[in-house]
């Protein structure tokens, strides 16, 4: 799995996750449990992870959707 996005913005994560799932790309949001433990204050970022062999395709989809500034690496 590769990290594509790290953010505190739940809307951005939800949008990106929806785009990737619609494209049939396996993804999940890591660190959600930590976010709940810290009281849902939004202090700890969550990470959008995708399957490694489809990371390039996922990056292209997210760039095309206007999320290029959110992408890591």
Image (tube, rainbow, N blue to C red):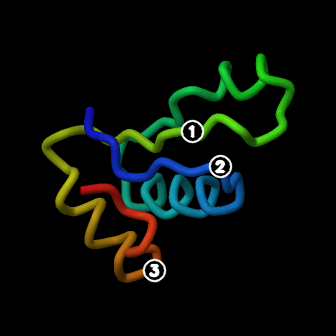
**Residue at label 1?**
46
Which label number is shown at residue 65? 3
Label 3 to label 2: alpha-carbon separation: 19 Å
> Crowding near pointer 3: few (<14 within 10 Å), some, many (20+)?
few
x and y percent of residue 7 in the render? 56, 51
Most distant residue in the left direction: 53
Label 2 to label 1: alpha-carbon separation: 6 Å
Most distant residue in the front direction: 43
Give the residue drawn at x 51%, y 30%: 30
Vertical side of 72 occupied by 44: above or below? above
Q: Nearer the viewer, residue 36 or 26?
A: 36
> Counting residues from the N terminus, which is met first, the one under dot 3 or under dot 2?
2
x and y percent of residue 51 in the render? 26, 38
Which label number is shown at residue 8? 2
Q: Nearer the viewer, mark 3 or mark 2?
A: 2
Residue 46 position by quadrant: top right
């Amino acid at each position: 799995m590769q990290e594509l996005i790290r953010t505190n913005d739940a809307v951005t994560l939800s949008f990106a996750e929806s785009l990737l799932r619609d494209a049939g790309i396996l993804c999940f949001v890591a660190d959600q449990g930590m976010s709940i433990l810290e009281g849902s204050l939004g202090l700890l970022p969550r990470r959008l992870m995708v399957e490694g062999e489809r990371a390039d395709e996922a990056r292209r989809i997210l760039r095309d959707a206007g999320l290029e500034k959110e992408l890591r690496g």
